[in-house]
């Protein structure tokens, strides 16, 4: 069960995204709900069906221009309602008593006027439940005064929200009201009548979904009171069986309708994403039969935080609604205007889809998705600079927002999940957990298709309630214990019972915010949701046309984005409880390759040709799938519409990074793994990890808990530059030696090595690892060749013995021992090291950190994420073959490498008696 006591301290979080297209009349009429026993609704007559979008997420709200674009799209696609409830409008919730300033009032009036121009009903919502005293007449008067002000702005429709608040009444209210429900209903009825009984007036109950009803829906005293006492013309918001409902059945709606004595308005969180920084939902509206339409008063979707990512969410919602707008069978034709060539009929067949056959005879999610993507594809070719979203017909001059505040965070920052790099103003910062269940009802992490066997499961967990663990960020000076601690399934379940998805106080919010979110807040998170013109002017307006770097492809000469690319994108970022078919296939293939890698291991004695061939064939197909993801990333990064790109970029960057790492690991499995390869210690449940598909792949890598290595923020400017990581081969040695020498001599005025000593640096730093431990080598490549390497050995003790027998003697022959009587050059000191006994490390240290690693990247590589990806591949290979800790050695005088490892942030300085005095040892557990 979910607690609700803690939400009082912090502003609640509601997450919603933006609109999507659907053709049809803007204000369609729908039949009244079919009368059921106990439901007091009229059988005859048509009334308006509320259909549209809620803006109620936590974080930076949408801009005025985005909202106007939303209204334009809603009108175009046949949706008729916009509910204004952004949680960062503090005067909506935290400081609900305060009146709007003159500047804010002007903006709201403009917004309300724009909605009217497009035939969209503007509903103003207020949330006084955090601290209102229901029995205090001054409080009631303050609420009336606030809504009077908004009425004068031209608003005719309102909503009172009492979601995510403490159930306990204050002593004064307990003397007046017999229950919390009576208090809420009393003030709601009074406000409704005071405002002249508006045609549209919504009420959000505290028990707004099935799991929040005590003890259950049919026996809830709270819901019974609402149904009996709330005036019949007031509509009630409901999210379904759960905060984020996978399915909303006809039976469940009929059940709650009987108790409420009216058909509910669904506040749908199926596409809300502000509870997890790595998730985006681009799948179709699904899990709601069109038979619901005549049984509901309306549906409002609470979508993704990123405005431009909501095309599919809104478009498919509108397709769903239009498919049974009049409660009868109807084919739906979606067009992109009068002259559009885009015209797709929703048919019954699934066209070979791998998904289970839909039982809804009026609506096919797969075809609705294809329709939405086909139309969305056209938007990507329309040149738009960042935050220059404008109404095409208006001819208004584009406004460009500066990105100077979007500098990439330092590498040493450690968080538990890859950060979503939010853009200023345009897209809100997403908190680690949502604070407002209703607004973004996903406190759990619902991935049912991602078990180790990737089987479909019907879980009762909600997306947001499953993600309850908070992983600590490593302290800078902490002892080397980099492995993040995960909450086990039992503990996770217990915490899910005791914690509400959005239960977050201010302190924990501050602790868990990513560097990007902190940057955003520092750069203007206090901007009011309506963003007055004066406030917008304060933002530097200098972010101009994207200019590719010297090593990047020109922006608009890359291959154009295809419908297949968008289809793949949608399947990688599908829905809260499921991945798309291609994503599921990739997970299954990677899991199989991982589980069967022993047949191609280097020490497999009995090679079975058929099994080896099967493994290699499936590995090639898997690599092709990985390449298609990387190609999609490249095409998207070069799209003309930078506005859309900036909303999608953090997510496609994230999935590209993890897929690249997984691809490299599979290549290593195919040629270097040992038959003793180890992976997971037990099968964690999918919700033990956040992060959508990227999180699932992380879970399947040996270093699944190394969240700091998966924390790879995207660059401040989108780039199409692609690096690849692959296993090391003997032919790569000259290139690695070259990088070794160039990086060692970087910054030196006079290179202290002659041509005869050209191999000396490589021989000293990496030669032994390349010769005696090639199985743990990876190289980094760009389009010009090798530009980095990661080398290691699983157990340094036998490696040192091999060096003494096979490597050192060879080096002693190659390099004569210099005369120690004279001052030695740098080259001579390096030669001398081959002739001196190297000081070993204490046994107590090596027992915990047996693996030695060496990583370096050429200075021309400016993308900081590739170093972490290389380290991830190397550490995965070491752990897969039994290592439980790794270390690196850096000379105290080597400032460059000390800086490199410290910025990488994944190694801690180790201190122990017996360490060599001139060397710094840095280690991490695996």
Image (spheres, grey):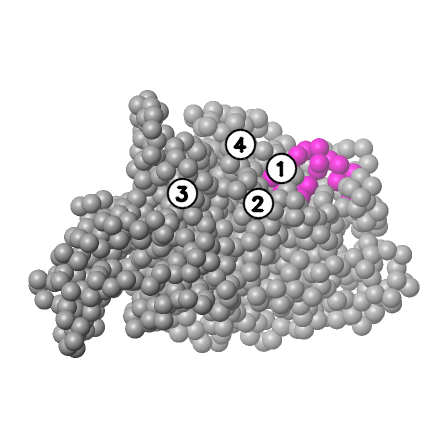
Q: Which residue is mark 1?
A: 459
Which of disc 4 and disc 3 is earlier in sequence?
4
Q: Note whether residue 343 is visible.
A: no
Task: Give the residues in magenta.
Answer: 237-260
For the residue pair 453 and 606, the one nearer the viewer reads as 606
Around disc 2, counting alpha carbons within 10 Å, would you say few (fewer than 14), some (14 to 19), or many (20 or more)?
A: many
* Disc 2 to disc 3, C-alpha distance: 27 Å
Q: Which residue is mark 4?
A: 455
Report the side of 142 relative to 863 (left or right): right
Q: Which residue is mark 2?
A: 687
Q: Which residue is mark 3?
A: 881
Q: Are marks 2 and 3 in contact (CB under 8 Å)?
A: no
Report the side of 259 relative to 279 (left or right): right
Q: Determine whether the residue tagged by mark 4 lies in a helix, strand or loop.
A: loop
Which of disc 3 and disc 2 is earlier in sequence?
2
Q: Determine whether the residue tagged by mark 2 lies in a helix, strand or loop.
A: helix
Point 89% across, 56% down: residue? 178
For the residue pair 546 and 503, the one nearer the viewer reads as 503
* Disc 1 to disc 4, C-alpha distance: 12 Å
Report the side of 178 relative to 708 (left or right): right
Point 42% across, 39% down: residue? 677
Q: Are marks 3 and 1 in contact (CB under 8 Å)?
A: no
Point out residue 160 in the picture as x, y percentages from the top left corner.
71, 58
Q: Looking at the image, is 422 positioned above or below residue 697? A: below
Q: Are marks 4 and 2 in contact (CB under 8 Å)?
A: no
Which of disc 1 and disc 3 is earlier in sequence?
1
Around disc 1, counting alpha carbons within 10 Å, would you say few (fewer than 14), some (14 to 19), or many (20 or more)?
A: few
Point out residue 740 in the picture as x, y percentages from the top left corner.
21, 60
Point out residue 599 in the picture as x, y percentages from the top left corner.
36, 29
* Disc 3 to disc 4, C-alpha distance: 27 Å
Is 774 one of the magenta-colored residues?
A: no
Q: Quadrant of residue 140?
A: bottom right
């Amino acid at each position: 069960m979910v607690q609700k006591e803690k939400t009082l301290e912090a502003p609640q979080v509601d997450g919603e995204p933006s609109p999507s297209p659907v053709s049809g009349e803007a204000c369609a009429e729908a039949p009244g709900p079919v009368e059921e026993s106990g439901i007091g609704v009229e059988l005859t007559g048509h009334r308006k069906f509320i259909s549209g979008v809620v803006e109620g997420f936590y974080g930076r709200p949408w801009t005025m221009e985005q909202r106007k674009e939303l209204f334009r799209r809603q009108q175009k696609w046949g949706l008729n309602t916009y509910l204004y409830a952004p949680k960062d409008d503090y005067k909506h919730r935290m400081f609900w008593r305060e009146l709007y300033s003159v500047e804010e009032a002007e903006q709201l009036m403009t917004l309300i006027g724009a909605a009217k121009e497009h035939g969209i009903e503007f509903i103003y919502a207020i949330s006084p439940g955090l601290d209102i005293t229901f029995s205090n007449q001054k409080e009631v008067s303050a609420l009336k005064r606030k809504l009077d002000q908004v009425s004068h702005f031209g608003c005719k429709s309102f909503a009172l929200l009492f979601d995510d608040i403490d159930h306990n009444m204050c002593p004064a209210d307990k003397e007046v009201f017999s229950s919390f429900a009576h208090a809420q209903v009393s003030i709601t009825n009074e406000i409704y009548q005071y405002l002249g009984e508006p045609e549209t007036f919504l009420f959000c109950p505290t028990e707004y979904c099935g799991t929040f009803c005590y003890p259950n829906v049919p026996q809830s005293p709270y819901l019974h009171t609402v149904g009996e006492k709330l005036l019949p013309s007031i509509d009630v918001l409901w999210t379904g069986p759960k905060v984020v409902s996978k399915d909303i059945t006809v039976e469940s709606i009929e059940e709650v309708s009987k108790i409420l004595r009216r058909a509910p308005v669904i506040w749908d969180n199926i596409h809300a994403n502000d509870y997890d920084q790595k998730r985006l939902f681009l799948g179709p509206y699904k899990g709601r039969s069109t038979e619901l339409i005549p049984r509901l008063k309306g549906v409002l979707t609470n979508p993704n935080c990123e405005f431009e990512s909501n095309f599919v969410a809104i478009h498919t919602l509108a397709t769903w609604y239009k498919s049974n707008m009049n409660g009868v069978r109807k084919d739906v034709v979606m067009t992109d205007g009068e002259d559009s060539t885009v015209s797709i009929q929703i048919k019954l067949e699934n066209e070979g889809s791998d998904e289970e056959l839909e039982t809804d005879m009026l609506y096919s999610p797969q075809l609705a998705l294809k329709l939405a993507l086909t139309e969305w594809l056209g938007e990507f070719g329309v040149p738009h600079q960042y935050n220059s979203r404008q109404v095409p017909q208006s001819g208004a001059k584009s406004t460009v927002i500066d990105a100077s505040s979007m500098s990439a965070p330092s590498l040493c920052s450690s968080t538990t999940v890859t950060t979503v790099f939010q853009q200023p103003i345009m897209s809100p910062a997403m908190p680690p957990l949502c604070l407002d269940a209703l607004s973004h009802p996903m406190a759990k992490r619902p991935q049912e298709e991602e078990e180790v066997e990737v089987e479909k499961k019907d879980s009762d967990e909600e997306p947001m309630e499953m993600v309850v663990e908070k992983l600590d960020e490593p302290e800078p000076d902490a002892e080397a214990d980099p492995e993040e601690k995960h909450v086990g399934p039992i503990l996770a379940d217990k915490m899910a019972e005791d914690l509400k998805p959005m239960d977050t106080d201010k302190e924990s919010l501050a602790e868990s915010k990513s560097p990007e979110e902190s940057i955003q807040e520092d750069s203007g998170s206090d901007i009011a949701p309506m963003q007055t013109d004066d406030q917008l002017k304060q933002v530097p307006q200098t972010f101009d046309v994207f200019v590719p770097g010297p090593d990047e492809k020109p922006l608009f000469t890359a291959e154009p984005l295809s419908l297949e690319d968008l289809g793949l994108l949608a399947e990688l970022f599908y829905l809260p409880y499921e991945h798309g078919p291609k994503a599921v296939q990739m997970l299954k293939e990677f899991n199989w390759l991982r589980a069967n890698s022993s047949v191609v291991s280097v020490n497999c004695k009995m090679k079975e040709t058929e099994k080896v061939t099967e493994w290699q064939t499936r590995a090639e197909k898997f690599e092709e799938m990985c390449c298609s993801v990387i190609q999609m990333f490249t095409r998207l990064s070069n799209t003309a519409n930078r506005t859309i790109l900036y909303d999608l970029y953090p997510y496609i960057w994230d999935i590209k990074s993890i897929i690249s790492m997984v691809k490299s690991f599979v290549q290593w499995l195919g040629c270097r793994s040992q038959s003793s390869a180890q992976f997971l210690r037990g099968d964690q449940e999918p919700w033990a990890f956040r992060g959508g598909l990227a999180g699932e792949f992380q879970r399947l890598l040996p270093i699944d808990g190394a969240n700091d290595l998966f924390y790879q923020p995207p660059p401040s400017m989108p780039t199409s530059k692609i690096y690849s990581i692959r296993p090391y081969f003997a032919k790569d040695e000259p290139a690695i030696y070259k990088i070794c020498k160039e990086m060692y001599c970087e910054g030196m005025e006079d290179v202290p090595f002659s041509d005869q000593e050209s191999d000396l640096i490589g021989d000293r730093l990496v030669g032994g690892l390349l010769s005696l431990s090639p199985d743990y080598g990876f190289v980094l490549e760009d389009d010009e060749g090798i530009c980095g390497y990661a080398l290691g050995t699983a157990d340094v003790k036998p490696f040192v013995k091999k060096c003494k027998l096979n490597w050192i003697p060879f080096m002693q022959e190659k390099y004569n021992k210099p005369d120690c009587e004279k001052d030695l050059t740098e080259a001579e000191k390096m030669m001398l090291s081959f002739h001196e006994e190297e000081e070993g490390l204490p046994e107590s240290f090596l027992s915990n950190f047996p693996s030695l690693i060496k990583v370096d990247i050429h200075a021309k590589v400016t993308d900081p994420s590739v170093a972490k990806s290389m380290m991830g591949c190397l550490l995965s290979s070491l752990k897969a073959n039994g290592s439980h800790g790794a270390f690196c050695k850096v000379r105290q005088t080597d400032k460059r490498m000390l800086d490199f490892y410290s910025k990488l942030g994944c190694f801690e300085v180790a201190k122990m008696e017996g360490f060599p005095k001139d060397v710094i040892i840095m280690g991490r557990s695996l």
